[in-house]
Amino acid sequence: MCMPREVTHEAKGPQRLDESDMGDDGAIYVCRCGLSKNKPFCDGSHNATADEDADALYKYENDDADGSRREIAEITYVEE
């Protein structure tokens, strides 16, 4: 289930993947929750989202799974 959360990214370009990025099972896991400390790769930080309410929006302090989480009213997008 996909639950919305605000995550701020500072990366400005792509990350090249190669064989050295593969796990022991031969797969490459890419972060989709936005909380990984090893972006673009998954580090298991999504486990912190397991008890999120599907109808709520969340902001994680410093976009960190170890940071405090708070519910927010809306996500506002700013055009650059």
Image: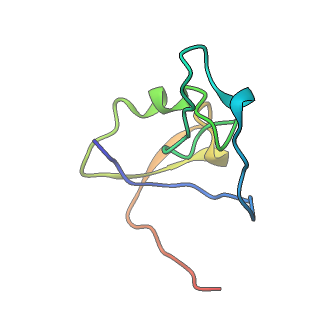
Looking at this view, name the residue that lies furthest to the left.
55
Q: Position of residue 36 (x, y in %)?
A: 62, 37
Q: Position of residue 59 (x, y in %)?
A: 51, 51
Using residue 11 as the reference point, say whether residue 33 is left or right of it: left
Count of numbered marks: 0
Front residue (pair 24, 53) = 24
Front residue (pair 62, 79) = 79
Please identify the quarter of the rendering in which residue 31 is found: top right
Q: Residue at x 62, y 47 (%)?
A: 63
Say if 21 sits above or below 70 in the image. Answer: above
Query: Quadrant location of the C terminus?
Result: bottom right
Using residue 73 as the reference point, say whether residue 8 is left or right of it: right
Query: Quadrant location of the N terminus?
Result: top left
Q: Residue at x 74, y 62 (%)?
A: 13
Q: Position of residue 65 (x, y in %)?
A: 58, 34
Say if 61 sits above or below 74 in the image. Answer: above
Q: Residue at x 67, y 42 (%)?
A: 39
Q: Residue at x 70, y 35 (%)?
A: 38
Front residue (pair 53, 70) = 53
Q: Position of residue 40 (x, y in %)?
A: 65, 44
Looking at this view, name the residue that lies furthest to the top.
24
Identify the image's colour scheme: rainbow, by chain, secondary structure or one colour: rainbow
